[in-house]
């Protein structure tokens, strides 16, 4: 018997709770039950055999936490543990027709960005386990009790890429229908089916009844076999014993059999008797035929975006024609890119296109950084935009969900390089209707290319619902007749080929005045022809408005509720009742956090005053007063930061004006700042950054959990005379000390200031720091002392 | 779900010793309080054990002193969940002032979750006196016990709390703590500065005064 054979049965019976059985049958108090494989082999073997006896088709070896990180304190390697556990399990089921699974769960540490474990390290840990499992004779791998979709992905890829074993994936959902990290059942199913899991489902946390809505959601989105392994109800808080008897558990599991759930078992509190009675209870039930329709959809780990109506792809994360964006890429300024993302999401983007291609940078490395960073602050699916297969693959690996790849075209070489990646990682793909002959003039010719792309995708196992066709927009001023050809092609693709369509809408107006007018009129025409995925700038009111209005007029936005919601809100500043009275000064606006007001005042002043005069006569005195008020306890941290943020807006406007008038922009003195290795609390460091920037310093922010060598390298590279280090925990102070030691050893002459909750001036001195910054204002004072006053960087 | 965050405590964490924020800060607190309350997915878990069988090592003088005359200990862990971290991260991109206020609100909220957990324990053991919550990192009680703490509570599986190599709990708004329990009469001591996240910078503490927390 192998797993493929098993799949022919109506139901595959899994095992029940292993850890709770160990506890029931012994008084073991090992910190990790895996150690029982060595210390009480009889107990482990008898529990596993009892499930085989009860009728389980698959039992788990006792390898739940057998990863190198968890085992480290016990002096056993993952390979040794897995070899032992599998030999115990296989011996236990000798004589039964039962498969043995390598059981795998979380490493026990959270992945980045909430934790410090990288995707790549998690992959390596799972690879070690998977390889050992196959070598020791596991029949399959069961990845279970997972809460982070990205960690499941690391484990699944590790098994798929390094063994030939089938893989079952199961996550644990709470009463609110989410895992601890926020993963939703449908996002899990969509992403894991794309990654070619052999079955998906749920285990642990709740009893059978409470899991029903979660399982129904999974059944509705995936064609894969589904797993359900509930607890025997909830544990009693005082005694810890589980509520459901074998008979009640078995009865409740019948519903899953009827719904077409194929893999049935139990988790905590279920005994061999629960499994035996469950098997009896479901035998003879005819599972209903699952009617899962393949839908076009993409997702993050928590949000599924179905392409069943116009969905906006934000185009702003792209350096083409954008000076500031290019500069941000060159300077590694990820925060700028993130601010572009959040702005678009707030404006209504459903999906974000991500293009970081620039000849001067390592596109692959930057793409991975940006994708990880975007996922740490936004919850919209991404469209990975690159022509390079190695960039695309690197992004697909670390993406947490199901993304879109932009793009392939009708050229064989491109299709055969990229479509296998789309299949392997389970993405959707944009197909451009052009090939080596360029963009064909006629709609029918473009449709021919579209068909070729769809056929080739099918050859690689990619469903038509995951291919989005781009019929390509040409500039109206240059090729006027081409406009209607594009629209005709959209019509045929959407309505005859039955695929979703994409169009980058902003180029249509190139070379014409009043571009916005052309853009949104074209957008409306395209939507009416069936365009589903317009790539636009969502920050432009008329473009967003056109999509929203179209959804009302086409009946997609039921009762116009989305439309009404979007246009019945006023901006916070409009409603806050602050008057735009003429006596308001920049100083007042800065002190009171009035960004819009401060911006208007700055622009007005620029008409009559020199930029540098505005800085020295208005902004700096305002900032100094705020700083003094903070020191004397008149104002507090939120107001200090808010004022800095408002003055930042003013600085940006002045800088833009200087740049426009051809002035040369100088950078202020560079200051390198970082939160030291091992430390992930970085809010304090980020406050320091905001304040320093507003005094004109060029802040090179290396982020959090930064290795010593990286800090030294950046300091030397930027010739920084001041370095700021932050640490919040006593456990990371040694890393701070080591960083200072390495900075000194480098021979580079710089001052070091340190700060963070557990630091004291004495301690700072003892680890070789030059300055102790009590708070963010203190850091600014140190910078002014070390590097000199306000930076004239205009 | 958190119904209402303790705004007074959030204001204290922002430096307003009397818990009364100024107008600008109050506006920010009122703006962000519902957002934090909505994002938080609080969870907690506890176990009770005789002191001598405590599965977490009781290293150092301070924890020993804390548990003097106690027969039992309650070990608890609590978290606001990963989404709170995402919220604070994303606020740092758009509004650092907002992020600082959210961070303080989250600090207040996690205390409320611990309070709730503590009252649940108190209700289960009405005849027991309880000490205040003592966490790894207080006094000389080392952070290195965190991994053992989480194992004892099966915290990864049951609450989603885990610990990094450097001993930090993740999600970041998470707490582990020990409460001493005794059937004898016990003087309930104040937790005070030992547990306060702003103790090193507190101007009141510098002057030898106390905010009353």
Image (cartoon, rainbow, N blue to C red):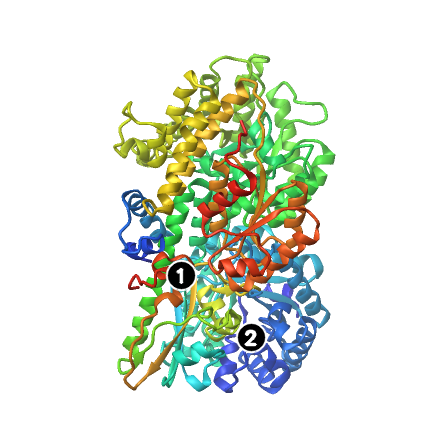
Between residue A555 and residue A764, name the one nearer to us. Answer: A764
SS for tag 1?
Answer: helix
Please tell me whether residue A570 is drawn above or below residue A508 in the rendered image: below
The answer to whether tags 1 and 2 share a subunit is: no
**Left or right: A617 in relation to A481:** left
- Name the residue carrying label 1: B199
- Asked whether residue A356 is in view, the answer is no
Q: Where is residue A631 in the image (x, y as percent from the top left)?
A: 38, 46
- Name the residue carrying label 2: A56
**Left or right: A379 in relation to A2:** left
Q: Position of residue A294 (x, y in %)?
A: 52, 46
Please tell me whether residue A407 is drawn above or below residue B18 in the rendered image: above
Q: Where is residue A302 in the image (x, y as percent from the top left)?
A: 47, 50
SS for tag 2?
Answer: loop
Neighbourhood count class around disc 1 (C-alpha, 10 Å): few under 14, some 14–19, many 20 upward: some
Chain letter of the residue carrying label 1:
B
Between residue A569 and residue A19, name the one nearer to us. Answer: A569
């Amino acid at each position: 018997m192998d797993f493929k054979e098993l799949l022919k049965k109506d139901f595959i019976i899994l095992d029940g709770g292993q850890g709770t059985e160990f506890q029931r049958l012994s008084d073991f108090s090992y910190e990790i039950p895996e150690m029982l494989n060595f210390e009480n082999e009889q107990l482990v073997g008898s529990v596993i055999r009892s499930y085989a006896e009860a009728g389980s088709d698959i039992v788990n070896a006792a390898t739940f936490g057998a990863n190198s990180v968890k085992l480290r304190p016990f002096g056993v390697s993952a390979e040794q543990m897995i070899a032992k556990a599998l030999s115990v399990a296989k011996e236990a089921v000798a004589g039964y027709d039962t498969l043995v699974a390598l059981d795998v769960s979380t490493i026990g540490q959270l992945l980045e960005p909430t934790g410090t474990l990288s995707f790549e390290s998690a992959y390596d840990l799972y690879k070690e386990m998977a390889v050992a499992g196959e070598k020791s004779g596991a029949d399959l791998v069961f990845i279970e009790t997972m809460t982070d979709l990205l960690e499941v992905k690391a484990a699944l890829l590790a098994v798929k890429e390094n063994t030939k074993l089938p893989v079952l994936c199961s996550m644990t959902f709470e009463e609110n229908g989410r895992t601890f990290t926020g993963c939703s059942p449908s996002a899990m199913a969509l992403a894991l089916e794309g990654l070619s899991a052999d079955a998906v489902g749920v285990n642990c946390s709740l009893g059978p009844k409470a899991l029903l809505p979660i399982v129904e959601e999974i059944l509705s989105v995936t064609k894969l076999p589904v797993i359900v392994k509930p607890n025997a109800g909830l544990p009693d808080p005082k005694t810890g014993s589980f509520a459901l008897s074998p008979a009640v558990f078995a009865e409740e599991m019948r519903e899953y059999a009827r719904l077409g759930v194929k893999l049935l078992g139990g988790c905590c509190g279920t005994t061999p008797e629960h499994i035996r009675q469950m098997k009896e209870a479901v035998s003879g039930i005819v599972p209903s035929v699952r009617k899962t329709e393949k839908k076009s959809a993409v997702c993050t780990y928590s949000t599924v975006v179905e392409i069943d109506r116009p969905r906006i792809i934000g185009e702003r994360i792209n350096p083409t024609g954008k000076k500031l964006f290019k500069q941000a890429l060159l300077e590694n300024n990820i925060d700028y890119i993130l601010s572009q993302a959040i702005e678009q999401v707030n404006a209504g983007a459903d999906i974000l296109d991500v293009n970081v291609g620039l000849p001067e940078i390592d596109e692959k490395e930057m793409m991975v950084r940006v994708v990880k960073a975007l996922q740490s602050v936004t919850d919209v699916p991404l469209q990975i935009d690159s022509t390079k297969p190695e960039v695309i693959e690197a992004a697909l690996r670390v993406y947490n969900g199901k993304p879109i790849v932009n793009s392939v075209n009708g050229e064989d070489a491109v299709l055969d390089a990229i479509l296998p990646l789309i299949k392997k990682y389970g993405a959707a793909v944009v197909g451009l209707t052009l090939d080596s002959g360029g963009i064909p003039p006629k709609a029918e010719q473009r449709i021919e290319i579209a068909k070729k792309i769809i056929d080739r995708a099918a050859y690689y196992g990619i469903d038509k619902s995951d291919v989005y066709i781009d019929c390509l927009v040409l500039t109206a001023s240059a090729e006027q007749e081409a406009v209607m050809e594009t629209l005709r092609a959209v019509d045929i693709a959407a309505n005859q080929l039955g695929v979703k369509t994409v169009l980058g809408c902003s180029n249509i107006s190139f070379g014409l005045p009043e571009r916005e007018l052309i853009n949104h009129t074209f957008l409306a025409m395209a939507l009416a022809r069936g365009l589903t995925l317009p790539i636009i700038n969502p920050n432009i009111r008329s473009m967003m408005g056109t999509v929203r209005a179209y959804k009302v007029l086409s009946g997609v936005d039921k009762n116009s509720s989305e439309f009404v919601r979007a246009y019945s809100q006023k901006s916070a500043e409009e409603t806050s009742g602050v008057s735009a009275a003429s006596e308001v000064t920049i100083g007042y606006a800065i002190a009171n956090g009035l960004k819009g007001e401060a911006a208007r005042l700055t622009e007005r002043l620029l008409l009559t005053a020199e930029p540098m005069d505005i800085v020295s006569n208005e902004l700096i005195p305002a900032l100094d007063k705020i700083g003094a008020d903070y020191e004397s306890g008149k104002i507090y941290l939120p107001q200090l930061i808010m004022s800095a943020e408002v003055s930042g807006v003013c600085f940006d406007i002045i800088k833009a004006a200087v740049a426009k008038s051809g002035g040369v922009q100088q950078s202020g003195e560079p200051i390198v700042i970082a939160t030291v290795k091992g430390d992930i609390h970085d809010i304090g460091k980020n406050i320091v950054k905001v304040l320093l920037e507003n005094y004109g310093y060029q802040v090179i922010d290396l982020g959090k959990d930064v290795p010593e060598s990286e800090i030294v390298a950046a300091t030397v590279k930027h010739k920084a005379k001041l370095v700021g280090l932050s640490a919040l925990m006593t456990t990371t102070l040694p890393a701070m000390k080591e960083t200072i030691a390495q900075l000194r050893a480098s021979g580079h002459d710089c001052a070091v200031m340190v700060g963070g909750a557990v630091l004291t001036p004495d301690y700072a001195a003892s680890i070789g720091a030059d300055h102790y910054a009590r708070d963010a204002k203190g850091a600014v004072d140190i910078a002014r002392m070390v590097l000199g006053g306000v930076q004239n960087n205009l | 779900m958190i119904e209402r965050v303790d705004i007074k405590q959030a204001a204290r964490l922002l430096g307003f010793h009397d818990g009364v924020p100024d107008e600008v800060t109050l506006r920010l607190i009122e703006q962000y309080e519902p957002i934090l309350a909505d994002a938080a997915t609080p969870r907690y878990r506890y176990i009770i054990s005789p002191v001598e069988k405590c599965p977490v090592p009781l290293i150092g003088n301070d924890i020993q002193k804390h548990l003097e005359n106690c027969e039992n200990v309650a070990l608890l862990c609590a978290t606001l969940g990963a989404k709170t971290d995402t919220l604070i991260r994303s606020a740092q991109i758009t509004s650092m002032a907002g992020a600082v206020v959210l961070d303080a609100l989250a600090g207040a909220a996690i205390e409320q979750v611990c309070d709730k957990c503590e009252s649940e324990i108190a209700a289960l053991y009405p005849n027991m006196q309880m000490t205040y919550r003592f966490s790894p990192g207080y006094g000389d009680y080392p952070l290195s016990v965190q991994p053992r703490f989480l194992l004892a509570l099966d915290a990864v599986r049951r609450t989603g709390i885990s610990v990094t190599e450097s001993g930090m709990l993740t999600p970041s708004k998470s707490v582990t703590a020990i409460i001493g329990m005794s059937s004898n009469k016990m003087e309930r001591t104040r937790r005070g500065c030992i547990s306060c996240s702003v103790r090193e910078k507190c101007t009141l503490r510098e002057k030898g005064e106390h905010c009353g927390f």
